[in-house]
Image: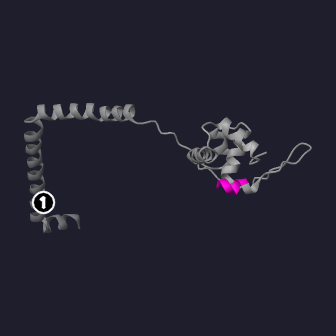
Amino acid sequence: MGTKFFFKYKHLIVYGFSLAVLLLLLQFLEYRLIIISHSFELYITAIAILFTVPGIWLARKLTRPKIITQLDTVVEEKEIIKTVTGNAPISIDVSAIEKLGLSSRAVEVLQLMAEGWSNAEIAERLFISLNTVKTHSARLFENLDVKRRTQAVEKAKRMNLIG
């Protein structure tokens, strides 16, 4: 059965084999023409790639800005409850606060200033940004007609704005 198949398709098998040999010959000639004739160019290209890839990697490594990643911060709204310590309760003049046009948040910032907290600590404690604390401070200074924190605290205590 195998020999009948070979004799039946003899012309097709010889034709296919000769095409395969011809294709191999053409591939060899193409190889010879490209690789051997242009070996210097291929050698230079290989060296260029060999030095370019590590060069790009090193340049990216050296010039990459240092990125500080921060974990997502969970912000919880908390109600701040003011308690009075000591014997006498503190009386706050609400009408003076309204007259000056101070918000409750600005009064909280002023109270924390009086307790000696820095702007960054106030921002962290009240869950607001540092710029917001600075804005409240600037408006407080303007409303109280003072230039420094100590002056603002002193004047606010005299006016019974804070305890």
Looking at the picture, tell me which residue is in the foreground, 69 or 143.
143
Residue at x-position 12% and y-position 31%: 40
Image quadrant in which the C terminus is located = top right
Count up the numbered dots: 1
Instruction: Return the x and y of residue 160 as percentages of the image width and height.
Output: 77, 47
Instruction: Return the x and y of residue 14 as percentages of the image width and height.
Output: 10, 59
Image coloring type: one colour
Q: Mark 1 sits on what residue?
A: 16
In the displayed image of the protein, which residue is found farthest to the right? 87
Q: Is 63 rendered above or below residue 22?
A: above
Image quadrant in which the N terminus is located = bottom left
Instruction: Return the x and y of residue 13 as percentages of the image width and height.
Output: 13, 61
Kindly state the secondary structure of the residue where label 1 is placed.
helix
Q: Is residue 74 left or right of residue 65?
A: right
Q: Is residue 120 left or right of residue 51?
A: right
Residue at x-position 26% and y-position 34%: 52
Res. 47 image quadrant: top left
Residue at x-position 39% and y-position 33%: 61
Q: What is the three-letter code of the residue carrying label 1?
A: Gly
Instruction: Return the x and y of residue 140 as percentages of the image width and height.
Output: 62, 46
Majority secondary structure in the magenta region: helix
Q: Is 44 rendered above or below residue 3?
A: above
First to last magenta residue range: 96-103
Looking at the picture, tell me which residue is in the foreground, 21 or 82.
82
Looking at the picture, tell me which residue is in the foreground, 52 or 83.
83
Res. 123 image quadrant: top right
Residue 1 showing in the rendered view: yes
Sort mark 1 into few (<14), some (14-19) or many (20+) by Cα contacts within 10 Å: few
Res. 54 image quadrant: top left
Looking at the picture, tell me which residue is in the foreground, 153 or 54.
153
Q: Is residue 2 magenta?
A: no
